[in-house]
Image (tube, helix red, strand yellow):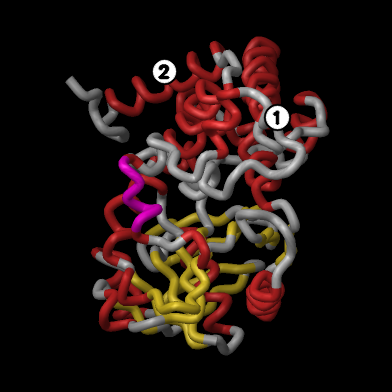
Amino acid sequence: MKVAVVGLGAVGGLIAARLAQAGTAVSALARGATLDAVRARGLRLVLDGRTSVARIDASDDPQALGVQEVLVIALKGPALIDVAPTLAPLIGPRTVVLPAMNGVPWWFLRAGMPEGADAGSPDARSVAALGAPLESVDPGGRIDTALPLAQVLGCVVHLTCSTPEPGHVQHGFGHRLIVGEPAGGLSERTRAVCELLATAGFVAEPSADIRRDVWYKLWGNLTTNPISALTGATTDRILDDPLVCAFMLRAMAEAAAIGARIGCPIEQSGEERMVVTRQLGAFRTSMLQDAAAARPLEIDAIVTAVHEIGGRVGVPTPNIGALLGLTRLMARVRGLYPPARS
């Protein structure tokens, strides 16, 4: 199977390296120092204490890579807005587009309201409308126009990795990738992509309700990611503070209420989810890693989108709003988020 990975950061680099080492024909779209490093030295991967090098065809020109069978997109949310319109040379009529990204994806509302959602209210019906992209993650619908929804599979990433330097990926823990159709149900292409990922050592699980899987992961990351970036604290220290925990639980309750309106109910309590998070130990979230490295923060896909959806379905979100405002202001002061429009 011919696979291209867009973005050789932590997640994209891990997927590309492991697929290449498993014998898959992998190419990558990269740029700058990462492209230079991969061309000169290959893509280095540290996994289970061992370092290996994957040689892959990397370019900054989509035309040079050609049409793919699977296109893995592993960019930060803000980058995809500009990159998506350039990816047409990689996408043929049967190309599967697999975004392996954090937070709420651009297709989340476009996939429609599943059976069981609270579609009785006018707000819920407006969310279900196919012509309502999320402005927070896809302003003007640019991504939706460039990447055909009928060719997209959802993907939820449950693993950790980092990039100590360009072209160098270090795996942390976890190997789980959940894959599914945006509109729900199981499909042959979902099974095929899971089998591909499994050959590379990932625990690839087909999902009949990928929207619900997306929302569940987001429910856990919604608070820990921005709070870690605001404070510089690892997750264990965040959970050790009773005042911070109380605030997190209030924000999580708001997100759970939104999930119930859009067909993505949460069956755990916030306290139960925190027990799971605590098992990770002194964990540095992806947003904390980005803040420490002075990289742009993925605030919109993780926090702003939840706030926007809450407004559409009529769920009050004062705690999520406070978290969004504080995190966004911090990021703007540090130059890690676009300035406010005048």
State the image coordinates of residue 171 (x, y, percent, origin top left).
Answer: 58, 61
State the image coordinates of residue 172 (x, y, percent, origin top left).
Answer: 62, 56
Question: What residue span does the magenta drawing correspond to?
Answer: 140-145
Residue 12: in magenta span: no
In the picture of the structure, the residue carrying the numbered disc 2 is: 325
Can residue 224 be seen here? The reply is no
* Badge 1: residue crowd in 10 Å (few <14, some 14–19, many ≥20): some
Q: Secondary structure at mark 2?
A: helix
In the picture of the structure, the residue carrying the numbered disc 1 is: 118
Can residue 186 be seen here? The reply is yes
- Write the residue at 65% across / 34% down: 262
* Quadrant in the picture for the N terminus: bottom right
- Write the residue at 44% across / 71% down: 5
Q: Is residue 245 above or below residue 21?
A: above
Q: Quadrant of residue 192?
A: bottom right
State the image coordinates of residue 174 (x, y, percent, origin top left).
Answer: 69, 57
- Write the residue at 38% across / 82% down: 67
State the image coordinates of residue 25 (x, y, percent, origin top left).
Answer: 49, 87
- Write the residue at 49% across / 79% down: 94
Give the amino acid at mark 2.
Answer: Gly
Q: Is residue 75 above or below residue 296?
A: below
Q: Is residue 340 above or below residue 250?
A: below
* Quadrant in the picture for the C terminus: top left
* Gap between marks 1 and 2 measured at Cα: 28 Å
